[in-house]
Amino acid sequence: MAGLKEYIGWRVLKKKKKGFQREIQVHNFETAKSAVLLFDTSDPESFPVIKEFRKFIEEKGIQCRAFGFVRQKEIPQEMLFWKNYSFITRSDRNWYLKPTGEVVDAFYTLDPDILIDFTMQAPLELQFLVQLSTARFKIGCYTEQENDYDLMINLTGKTDIGYLADQIKHYVSMLNPSN
């Protein structure tokens, strides 16, 4: 049954993408004014990396929001104390896995310069967010799956989120959007 739900979810996402328009514009850490970070909370290594990356972004003068995907129905107790982080749970999705609710509505009202997806294997729930975001520059892990990334980072077999964060810092800093 889960396979059918996911199949229908991918079909719905593909259909929604047909009428979706966004302005694409390359940004680096000097030109961006706002950013959104997406991450999967099931990786215990993710929060310290996201916290440090968010601090790095904010020190550059970029307004930053972070959204975590919780694979449980409720937000775990320890995550309730994470200030300025929003969470999407399994309860915040419809029958074909499309995220819904207040947090998702807040996400879609944002119009960031950069969206960074820190998930190694982006679940359908987060692909709805990534592909239907109006972010001008989208960054994520390399995948052969259909995606909406403007810059993909190939980790060459590594699965360390810290390594991904370092690679994003390195390559985005090298970008020269004025050309």
Image (tube, rainbow, N blue to C red):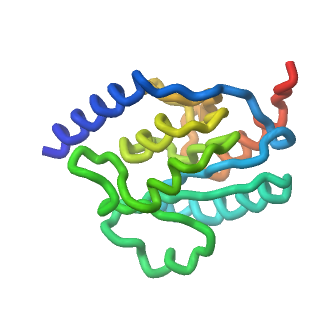
Would residue 71 appear left or right of 144 to someone viewing this image?
Answer: left
> Residue furthest toward the left?
1
Closest to the observer: 156 or 13? 13
Asked if residue 86 is positioned above or below residue 120 in the image, the reply reads: below
Q: Which residue is at 53% across, 39% downward? A: 133
Q: How many marks?
A: 0
Quadrant, the C terminus: top right
Please provide percent x and percent y for residue 111: 62, 44
> Residue furthest toward the top?
179
Closest to the observer: 44 or 34? 34
Please provide percent x and percent y for residue 159: 54, 45
Please provide percent x and percent y for residue 10: 30, 33
Would residue 47 appear left or right of 103 to someone viewing this image?
Answer: right
Please provide percent x and percent y for residue 17: 41, 27
Q: Which residue is at 50% across, 78% downward? A: 80
Q: Which residue is at 51% across, 46% downward? A: 119
Would residue 137 appear left or right of 149 to someone viewing this image?
Answer: right
Q: Which residue is at 46% across, 54% downward? A: 105
User: Would you identify the image quadrant in which residue 167 lies?
Assistant: top right
Quadrant, the N terminus: top left
